[in-house]
Image (tube, rainbow, N blue to C red):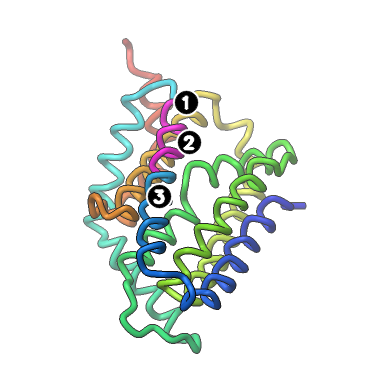
């Protein structure tokens, strides 16, 4: 039973709902300050994930190659277009909607190293504690961002649930195939994306997070290829 996955997704759903309802009561200066704080918190979580990797080169190569591939495929624009169509199909008020900011929040919830690692851990061991810890952070993150982005933040719980359930049910089959080094590098790669999302949320640098997502698919095979090299 994916208890941690369900709790985490419900935290995003209800954090978005409560945040949208309270949005008019949160002063703009407070929202701005908390947005920067959450951006820096995401950056810190990314650093924590990165320091776990065992081999720097495969992670760096995966990030570079994955970002290049994502850029060539216009992945971020495609993700943005997909969410635009999803939001257009829902009865949501999206006046002056910041899609760039929204895509950043999507990546934070759906592809952070912390979330991916927590989901894989629960799938392999049955321990939901990591995802329950993440759920607490995600609830307040969704609450704050929903003040500006409205109920659309709650919609993120749908792709998050799909991605996390896919990882959860794949974890038992993947466990014998993924070495400790490959897993650590995978977590670290997610940490790089989480750091990028933190920079983007805090509006320090507009990192192309959506284009970087293919790095997550490349880091494990790159790790195995790197270990085969004669040095």
> Magenta segment range?
43-51
Rendered image: mark on residue 187: 2
Please, is residue 32 above or below residue 188 in the view?
below
Residue position for label 1: 52
* Visible residue check, residue 213: no
Residue 213: assigned label:
none
Residue 231 visible to an observer of this rendering: yes
Q: Which residue sits at x=50%, y=58%?
A: 141
**Is 71 on the left or on the right of 216, as rendered?**
left
Decide whether the magenta segment is chiefly helix, strand or loop. helix
Q: Disc 1, disc 2: CB below 8 Å? A: yes
- Residues under labels 3 and 2: Cα distance? 23 Å
Q: In the picture shown, does residue 110 fall above or below 122?
A: below
Q: Nearer the viewer, residue 180 or 202?
A: 202
Decide which of 98, 127 is in the foreground and name it: 98
Determine crowd level at label 3: few under 14, some 14-19, many 20+ residues with C-alpha closer than 10 A. some
Q: Position of residue 47 (x, y in %)?
A: 40, 33
- Whether pointer 3 and pointer 2 mark residues with C-beta atoms closer than 8 Å, the reply is no
Residue 37 is situated, as x and y percent measured from the top left of the image, at: 40, 50
Residue 80 included in the magenta stretch of the image: no
Quarter location, residue 230: top left
Give the mark, 1 or 2, whose residue is nearer the N terminus: 1
Residue occupying the point 60% across, 68% down: 13
Nearest the eye: 111 or 219: 111
């Amino acid at each position: 039973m994916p208890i941690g996955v369900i709790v985490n997704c419900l935290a995003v759903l209800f954090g978005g709902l409560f945040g949208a309802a309270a949005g008019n009561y949160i002063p703009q200066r407070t929202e701005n300050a908390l947005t920067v704080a959450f951006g820096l918190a995401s950056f810190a979580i990314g650093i924590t994930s990165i320091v776990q990797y065992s081999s720097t080169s495969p992670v760096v190569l995966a990030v570079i190659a994955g970002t290049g591939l994502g850029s060539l495929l216009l992945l971020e624009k495609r993700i943005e277009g997909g969410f635009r169509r999803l939001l257009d199909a829902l009865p949501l008020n999206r006046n002056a909607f910041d899609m760039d900011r929204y895509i950043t929040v999507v990546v934070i919830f759906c592809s952070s190293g912390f979330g991916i690692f927590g989901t894989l851990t629960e799938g392999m061991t049955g321990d939901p504690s990591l995802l329950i810890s993440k759920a607490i952070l995600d609830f307040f993150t969704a609450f704050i961002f929903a003040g500006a982005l409205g109920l659309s933040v709650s919609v993120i719980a749908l792709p998050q649930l799909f991605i996390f359930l896919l990882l959860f049910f794949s974890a038992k089959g993947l466990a014998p195939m993924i070495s400790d080094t490959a897993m650590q590098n995978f977590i670290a790669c997610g940490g790089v994306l989480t750091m990028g999302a933190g920079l983007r949320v805090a509006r320090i640098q507009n990192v192309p997070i959506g284009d970087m997502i293919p790095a997550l698919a490349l880091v494990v095979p790159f790790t195995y290829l790197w270990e085969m090299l004669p040095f």
